[in-house]
Image (cartoon, rainbow, N blue to C red):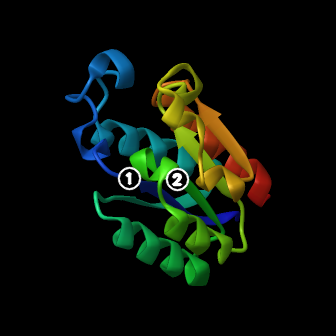
């Protein structure tokens, strides 16, 4: 059995489905979580799905994952472009890390083109809408086999 995967979501993703649906789509974060839970079960994975608008909570979950998880999927949202602290925490995690972005950040404002998290991520999925989470989960299942 491949194991436990943390799926971490950064600031404002609690507003998914209501905030800028022309960019992020109509699905809610609860919809994303349900899709991830269904796929995880089919892949023999267990997930812990978290969202926070607070950087320190994401860092605490990365620290928790060090002791119990085999992989991390993270959509750091705005912390992608600002958080050296989150990067430092991810560097302490020994399993695979996959970075997900709902929009294609490279077609957006130039400040979104840089990701601190990418300096640690084993792969990046961007621009596939919320389906990117499922793509990341499938890839994680492959990496953990």
Residue 111 rendering spot, x and y as whole percentages: 50, 36
- In the figure, 117 relative to 124: above or below? below
Residue that label 1 marks: 10
Any part of residue 31 in sight: yes
State how far apart marks 1 and 2 are (Cα): 8 Å
Return the residue found at the far top: 22
Any part of residue 75 in sight: no
**Residues tagged 1 and 2 counted as in contact (Cβ below 8 A):** yes
In the displayed structure image, the side of residue 37 where residue 44 appears, left or right? right
Residue 40 rendering spot, x and y as whole percentages: 55, 50
Q: Nearer the viewer, residue 76 or 47?
A: 76
Residue that label 2 marks: 74
Residue 115 rendering spot, x and y as whole percentages: 59, 47
Give the mark nearer the N terminus: 1 vs 2: 1
Q: Nearer the viewer, residue 37 or 97?
A: 97
Q: Quadrant of the C terminus?
A: bottom right
């Amino acid at each position: 059995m491949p194991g436990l995967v943390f799926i971490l979501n950064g600031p404002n993703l609690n507003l998914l489905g209501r905030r800028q649906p022309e960019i992020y789509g109509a699905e809610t974060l609860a919809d994303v979580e349900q899709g991830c839970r269904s796929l995880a079960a089919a892949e023999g994975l267990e997930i812990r799905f978290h969202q926070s608008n607070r950087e320190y909570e994401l860092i605490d979950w990365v620290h928790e994952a060090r002791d119990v998880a085999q992989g991390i999927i993270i959509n750091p949202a705005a912390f992608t472009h600002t958080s050296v602290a989150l990067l430092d925490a991810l560097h302490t995690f020994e399993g695979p890390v996959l970075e997900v972005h709902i929009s294609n950040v490279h077609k957006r404002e130039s400040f979104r083109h840089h990701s601190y998290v990418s300096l640690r991520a084993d792969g990046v999925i961007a621009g596939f809408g919320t389906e990117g989470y499922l793509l990341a989960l499938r890839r994680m299942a492959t990496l953990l086999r």
